[in-house]
Image (tube, helix red, strand yellow):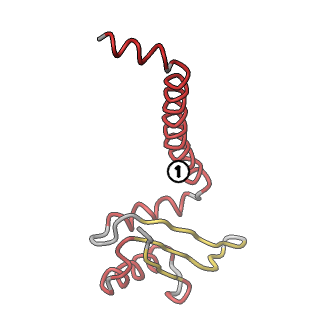
Amino acid sequence: MRKVLNFVNDNKKIIIVVVLIIILIGTIYFLNKSSGKTQSATNLANKSQTEVKLTSILSSIEGVGTTDVMINESEGDILGVVIVCEGANSLMTRSNILNAVSTALNIDKKLIAIYSMNL
């Protein structure tokens, strides 16, 4: 016990610096985690109701998985739709997505682009 106390007394400055670095790293880690949640909330707030509904519908289709949707509109007309999802590598899933989006938005399938999500 005495050896530990002597070590602490001899190295107070080093121990304080190490503890402060650990606290700083922990603070940065938790701040980054919470800013990611804020960023997701901000992204959701920037989406139109149609994009939010379409994202929900597509995510509920078997095999689609996590989905992100962007609709490019001009004066109410849909110019194109971009869908990025986990299940885009499957031809059957891509076909289901294409049919669902085309039907839901009443647009030509040529206006829909589907990409695989980078995991």
Horizontally, residue 105 falls left or right of residue 1, namely: right
Find residue 86 and report its image quarter: bottom left
Q: Which residue is mark 1?
A: 40
Q: Position of residue 77 (x, y in %)?
A: 66, 75
For image coordinates 51% across by 82% down, the residue present is: 113
The correct choice, above or below, for 39 with respect to 89 in the image is: above
Give the quarter of the figure containing the C terminus.
bottom left
Out of 93 and 32, give the one closest to the viewer: 32
Find residue 43 and report its image quarter: bottom right
Badge 1 crowding class, 10 Å Cα cut-off, few under 14, some 14 to 19, many 20 or more, is few
Q: Amino acid at mark 1?
A: Ser
Give the quarter of the figure containing the N terminus.
top left
For image coordinates 44% across by 71% down, the residue present is: 118
Find residue 3 and report its image quarter: top left
- What SS does tag 1 mark? helix
For image coordinates 45% across by 76% down, the residue present is: 101
Q: Position of residue 45 (x, y in %)?
A: 59, 50
The correct choice, above or below, for 63 with respect to 5 in the image is: below
Total of numbered circles in the picture? 1
